[in-house]
Image (cartoon, rainbow, N blue to C red):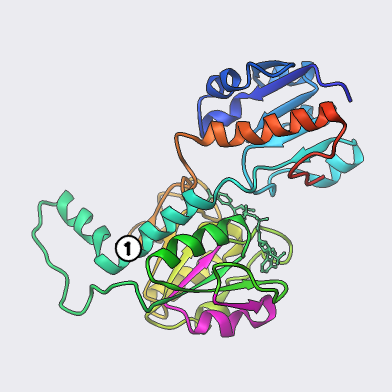
Amino acid sequence: FELERLGVHDSVSAVFPPSELETFLADLPVSVEVVDDDGIDACDAVVTRDYHEAMLECAWVHSIQAGIDRFPLDDFEANDVALTNSTGIHDRTIGETVAGYLLAFSRRLHEHVANQQKRRWDRPEWDEAFTLPGTTACVVGTGTLGRGVAETLGALGVRVTGVRRSTDPVPGFEEIYATDDLHAAIGEADFVVVTVPLTDDTEGLFDAAAFDAMREDAYFVNVARGAVVDEPALIDALESDAIEGAALDVFETEPLPEESPLWDLEDVIVTPHCGAFTRDYFRDVGGIVRENVGRLEAGEPLHNRVV
Ligand code: NDP
């Protein structure tokens, strides 16, 4: 199709100012404009965070997120609308976020920050702090996020194992397990890090049995999607000391409801789904959009096409 008008939907403002992307793409040979819901109709293509029904009239929709679980894929297919996503850009951001969680747990930084708010000079018990070299992290999902986590943790001396659907090796991972062997894989880890997409197969993958399989002194990290985890089972595991702690960027319900016990549990770090935030986000997304506008002009298949 002929691309004439590319909209930047204002829902991207949850991650960066839409005008930054508009300016960044201004040199493209198409008209680029920030649009609200009413403006979608007039576009052939939109870059967006949220789904809106009017997008089914476009020829191409680009998601600024890697996860496409909020888009009705069958409707895209039925209406012949191309959907592309932003996988490939979150390796370093998520890798550093996860490294930050692990360093907080090992060096007790989250406790110091909490104590500082209360002007309290409290030292950890003698046996609470530790160092990362020699610990093992099992990373479930070995795509962009998983590889970024493996690279960052590897540099800190952490031994990294991975879980994916096949057992083909992946650079940066010392050992790879198939999803069928998930419990064996996570059973030996000091840290379990979830980086899989939310699909029918991964929904509720981390249930009571998975938390049972984890070591009692292990930490659980979720930077994927809330629904990959059975949240009540996680809360049970934390409250009963079946696991040591958790760092969570994503939740079943977002924003995390005020009454959730997760806010107050010891050794739980809550971050508001911003593990991939960076002031360069619009440039990283813009790079994919620019590449795909070029491909459309050249009649080549779109990069990161999902539907
Ligand atoms: P990729 O597509 O690059 O990687 C996904 C990986 O998951 C693949 O390597 C795949 O490996 C593996 N996988 C898929 N299904 C299963 C399964 N059933 N069991 C085990 N492994 C599986 O995606 P990204 O790494 O870019 O993103 C992953 C997800 O992370 C996104 O879908 C999104 O939901 C979330 N995300 C969260 C962010 C945040 O802000 N917290 C930021 C970015 C992404 P294989 O094919 O070998 O099974």
At horizontal 90% and vertical 36% (from top left) the residue drawn is 80
- Crowd tier of the residue under label 1, counting other residues whose Cα lies within 10 Å: few below 14, some 14–19, many 20 or above: some
Q: Which residues are magenta?
A: 174-194
Measured as percent of width and height from the top left, residue 3 is found at 82, 21
Q: Dividing the image into 4 quarters, which one contains the N terminus? A: top right
What residue is shown with label 1?
103
Q: Quadrant of residue 35?
A: top right
Q: Quadrant of ligand 1?
A: bottom right
258 to 171, vertically: above or below = above
Examine the rendered structure and indicate whether residue 252 appears above or below residue 135.
Answer: above
Q: Is residue 58 visible?
A: no
**Looking at the image, can residue 297 be seen?**
yes
Residue 182 in the magenta stretch? The answer is yes
Quadrant assignment, res 114: bottom left
Image quadrant assignment for residue 163: bottom right
Percent x, y for residue 42? 78, 15
Left or right of 188 in this view: 28 = right
Q: Is residue 199 above or below residue 58?
A: below
**Whole-percent x and y of residue 181?**
65, 82
Q: Is 62 contained in the magenta span?
A: no
Query: In this image, 129 relative to 284: left or right?
Result: left
Residue located 38% across and 71% down the image: 157
- In percent of width and height, residue 107 lies at 25, 66
Task: Identify the secondary structure beneath mark 1.
Answer: helix
**Residue occupying the point 61% across, 31% down:** 286
| Apparent side of residue 282 relative to residue 68 in the rendered image (left or right) | left
Q: Which quadrant holds the C terminus?
A: top right
Q: Amino acid at mark 1?
A: Leu
Residue drawn at (77%, 19%) of the image: 43
